[in-house]
Image: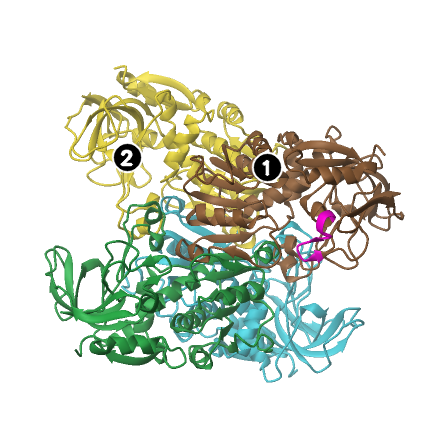
Chain colours: A green, B brown, C cyan, D yellow
Amino acid sequence: MRACVIHGAGDLRVEEWPDRPPGSGEVTVEVEVGGICGSDLHYYRDGAVGDFRVVQPLVLGHEIAGRVVACGEGVEGLEPGATVAIHPATPCGACRECTSGHRNVCRRARYLGSAALVPHVQGGFRERLVVAADQLRLLPETMDLRRAVLAEPLSVALHAVRRAGPVLGRRVLVTGAGPIGCLVVAALRHAGAAEVVVSDLLDEPLALAARMGATSTVRADAPEDPAWPEEVDTAIEASGAPVALRTCVERARRTGTVVLLGLLPPGEVGLLANRVVTHELTLRGAFRFDEEFDHALSLLAGGLDVSALVTHTFPLAQAGQAFDLAGDRAVASKVLIDLAGG
Amino acid sequence: MRACVIHGAGDLRVEEWPDRPPGSGEVTVEVEVGGICGSDLHYYRDGAVGDFRVVQPLVLGHEIAGRVVACGEGVEGLEPGATVAIHPATPCGACRECTSGHRNVCRRARYLGSAALVPHVQGGFRERLVVAADQLRLLPETMDLRRAVLAEPLSVALHAVRRAGPVLGRRVLVTGAGPIGCLVVAALRHAGAAEVVVSDLLDEPLALAARMGATSTVRADAPEDPAWPEEVDTAIEASGAPVALRTCVERARRTGTVVLLGLLPPGEVGLLANRVVTHELTLRGAFRFDEEFDHALSLLAGGLDVSALVTHTFPLAQAGQAFDLAGDRAVASKVLIDLAGG
Amino acid sequence: MRACVIHGAGDLRVEEWPDRPPGSGEVTVEVEVGGICGSDLHYYRDGAVGDFRVVQPLVLGHEIAGRVVACGEGVEGLEPGATVAIHPATPCGACRECTSGHRNVCRRARYLGSAALVPHVQGGFRERLVVAADQLRLLPETMDLRRAVLAEPLSVALHAVRRAGPVLGRRVLVTGAGPIGCLVVAALRHAGAAEVVVSDLLDEPLALAARMGATSTVRADAPEDPAWPEEVDTAIEASGAPVALRTCVERARRTGTVVLLGLLPPGEVGLLANRVVTHELTLRGAFRFDEEFDHALSLLAGGLDVSALVTHTFPLAQAGQAFDLAGDRAVASKVLIDLAGG
Amino acid sequence: MRACVIHGAGDLRVEEWPDRPPGSGEVTVEVEVGGICGSDLHYYRDGAVGDFRVVQPLVLGHEIAGRVVACGEGVEGLEPGATVAIHPATPCGACRECTSGHRNVCRRARYLGSAALVPHVQGGFRERLVVAADQLRLLPETMDLRRAVLAEPLSVALHAVRRAGPVLGRRVLVTGAGPIGCLVVAALRHAGAAEVVVSDLLDEPLALAARMGATSTVRADAPEDPAWPEEVDTAIEASGAPVALRTCVERARRTGTVVLLGLLPPGEVGLLANRVVTHELTLRGAFRFDEEFDHALSLLAGGLDVSALVTHTFPLAQAGQAFDLAGDRAVASKVLIDLAGG
């Protein structure tokens, strides 16, 4: 079969990849749609995401949906032809994090399309994928797979909102209006946030954020814009830009919360630490998700309208173009790869 | 009367200061003992603490205990001669923080001996102080005022431990073995922490931390020392050194908590932000205290043994020497000023 | 002026009540609309609410909105003619609850139209009311006072939802579809609850609950109805019926939360205590509200659609009929008194 | 081998029980000491604990320590002769509770000596027990097994204290001074509770509670005793008596917490529900424990002094007498069975 494989910074190839039959408890899925994530882009540009460096060919992709082709021994409740979304994480189930309810930070978790472990865990931008049956979520027949594929980034957003603590009736700042930032906006509004202010350096993502429910938008490079709130209850950093972290800390009110969601540059990033002390701020990291995946699918099935997020779709053969465009934030937001169409 | 007044960086004078009679609801206290705090030292060295700069003569001192001399109109339950500790903070009672249970970060709080407001709130290193009656706490007759004066820094430590969340049975790292770090150690042990590891650059403060209950001590400049724990549940940064914040973030386990207690240098300090994200750490500022003051006094009255912390006592006339010595961490920990003895 | 006064169980009179000018910091409000609350009904039927018994004539009413008539000395920002909602609670500001962020349970709070204190705090079902200026909330000019008057019960509902902890994506049971139960449903949906199941003994309130956003409704007397969820994450008891509390405890999943919102009969009520133990349930009381009032007004101004809740409006002269009808749950939900129309 | 087997209410027999070799991953332990728990007593008296009824012969006992005799295939790190304590619970690892950090309430957990499942999980009051290796905790050679056997009930107490939330500096009421209540007292003091008031109907358990660290004790049948605190921050119900639950609810301050730890009679128990509402109390069930077992062993190894709790030890042959005595609260607290001595 064909797969979208990264070999190093800038070296993305659509090439042949070995197939294998499903083992016991496993299922072969014909992948139909894949969404390009910020971490996929990092692998493409830098050959690494944070501290995770590509050291062997890696099939990218962890936002995927498709159709069951064959079931291994012992698999029940799944028929060939059924459409499914795929939970990309497999926590170990035994470590301290897993047994204490924090499976999303399991130190031995396997995550589709990630270089965190060596050998790497191969991802889902390929024509067929063999995965454990318990990673599959059966979809309603009527559900568009282009919609289902958003469940993964929406789960990330829902998890970040959960980490933010109570947001009902609160004023929240979201820095960064990329696909994740926009889904955070949608999740915050769904969770009853009274005001959601979004900042970004570009107008196009801000326009999209407004469509996702932002109550106001501000240009990150216009600090004097009166639309900036003097203080917010909660700030969610979704851009990965150090200057945005500073903005979050400056705008959070005393005893407020700042969620760090966007992956920041490796090493040290500047923090207004004294403000954290004297304002008794709380900073919380938010990483991946666990059970939020089912909630995300349920929201998407129930009609949560985030379809404007998908700006482009490319066939697998044009994966390189898809990646190039996905990196152009002025033009694209979420870019999909159509793996079914060939 | 005489008072210990800072006029600018390095310019500390023992000089005459005007007296006044107690107003309605106020009490005149003859101050007997004062403790020199890290922030007093900052005013002495830098003429400023963080962003608060001395712009007019400021009587230092907010760790004080003494004896009631005279009561203004309407004051009940306090007789001349009674020994008292003094709560240094007066929150406004009306702002959002005050009405939501966070009086310690009241944006309009008055704090003895602080340049946060202009005109400054004059402090307690003086022979007589007029304060509101509700700032006084009556002491048991048998309680040594040199012990009572530790209630203020102990309150800071207790508040930081509260901010840390549950510590019962947990392994905790404390960076910095100054007076506050040592009191954090005592508070952690009192709260049932199973292990308390303390780091510092000097051996003398570490020896004191061990006396306060540290289960192990490590030199901050010996990162290979096997006594360093691989990971801790909780870390409390009590040194004010940026490198120590880094240590806290590096040593905290996934989902662990880092409390920022020590005032760090103004502006930005390096943070391993990606580790906060991928390990889902929680960072919390801890600032001052509120009701912990009564708890601290109760612990001290009940025999919590922190007396080793007091290494030196000087008469008011030698306040300059007291401040100089208090800054020498290899020799001194908590330095007291005896205001009664003249 | 005329007022709606309870003299004892069943003895409700519309009668003359003395007027007075506003004092310093006070405002005279011409009350235009009042909503009849469950506690008003309890006073009417039983001469008491829980342990609070009417021992002197009491003007009922704490859900009120009106128009500024005159301002006392020192009042700023309010002009005669302005429409306002009135926060019914005045916490003392000094007790342990007030200083720790729990003003809603202040032990010395004054609450409009309540027999909790003697002398009673007189309520707002009267033509003119003198209140402290800081109890007033200025309304948008376009806001119907019949809508504004729902802010008080909506605040109660929002507070209960806050007490429930995170509800985003959760399945929630609400027992009781009276006005408060219905507003809890609306608040839960607004806060992102995935499923809201509502139970009641009558079909009419259930139909209203469905309009407020319930995802399914069940008859409390049909325990075999398959619409009953086997287990819910959270249950909110809003009926005041002991059997409903039992239902909540039986349906809550392990580690789930049950919020007690409805006032239950005085004395002891049966609790499946062993289930609380073995399932590690959490039960939380929810009482009144504090800052939720502003949030409620903001939601109502922003278009939260709860207008179906108001089933009837009566002039003050027919207050007795209004109360009689408000007690007939098969016919009425929220019943208003029009105090402006005479 | 011989075992202590319950056949129904009052029918306790020391009789032969089949032996078996350890399977893969299992270990055979020669049980040396067993502690009689309140639930063992319930099985003895009533043939049931709460809703769990003995329907087949059941070896009692889940507080046990002993010595490794033989290891099955694949077991590492355990040598014959090593002394061990045994964690009595085996959660399923897959249910919603297990994956969300609440393994102690796993709906499919196996617990030594419990009739919760059918067939029952056979317990540890027998000469030899085969258990999974991961249930064993290696003990320091110097640790008396009579001390180690207290780890199980101490874990229960530690878990209840954790469920109580912050207790540092707080005033706590414990109702019931049986072995669990006494260990709760020790755990509370270890966690820094400022005051621990204990109530019981008998003087002897109260005297023991005082030795465990209670700051005051009161007779439950002397409600006018001035030693009763007017209000407490937290109450832990450890008696299983409905009237004690009432006391906890009556004495808890506004916004206080009541932990339900003692198993109460089946069915409904009276609750002052309106007080829960108007005082915004929080009630929390506390059931078993999970990781607290390691903490308990560490505390016992470290010298936490709870040895006074053990009032009697009987050889296995006199198990009946041991159970009879253990039920006499005026004479006995924790009663041990010596299974090594024959």
Up/down of C320 relative to D296, above or below: below
- x%, y% of residue C155? 55, 67
Q: Disc 2 marks which residue?
A: D135
Q: Disc 1 marks which residue?
A: B182
Total numbered labels: 2
Give the CA distance from mark 2 to mark 1: 38 Å
In magenta stretch: residue D34: no
In this rendering, position of residue D147 left or right of residue A259: left
Category of crowding for the residue at label 1, using alpha-carbon neighbours closer than 10 angstroms: few (below 14), some (14–19), many (at least 20): many
Considering depth in this image, is B230 or A164 the residue closer to the camera? B230
Determine the residue positioned at 59% across, 77% down: C337
Q: Which disc, if any, is residue A30?
A: none
Determine the residue positioned at 55% across, 58% down: C287
Considering depth in this image, is A260 or D225 the residue closer to the camera? A260
Considering depth in this image, is A93 or B325 the residue closer to the camera? B325
In this rendering, position of residue C269 left or right of residue A52: right
Is residue D165 in sight in this rendering? no
- x%, y% of residue B95? 67, 61
Question: At label 2, which amino acid type do we have?
Answer: Gln
Element at label 2 = helix
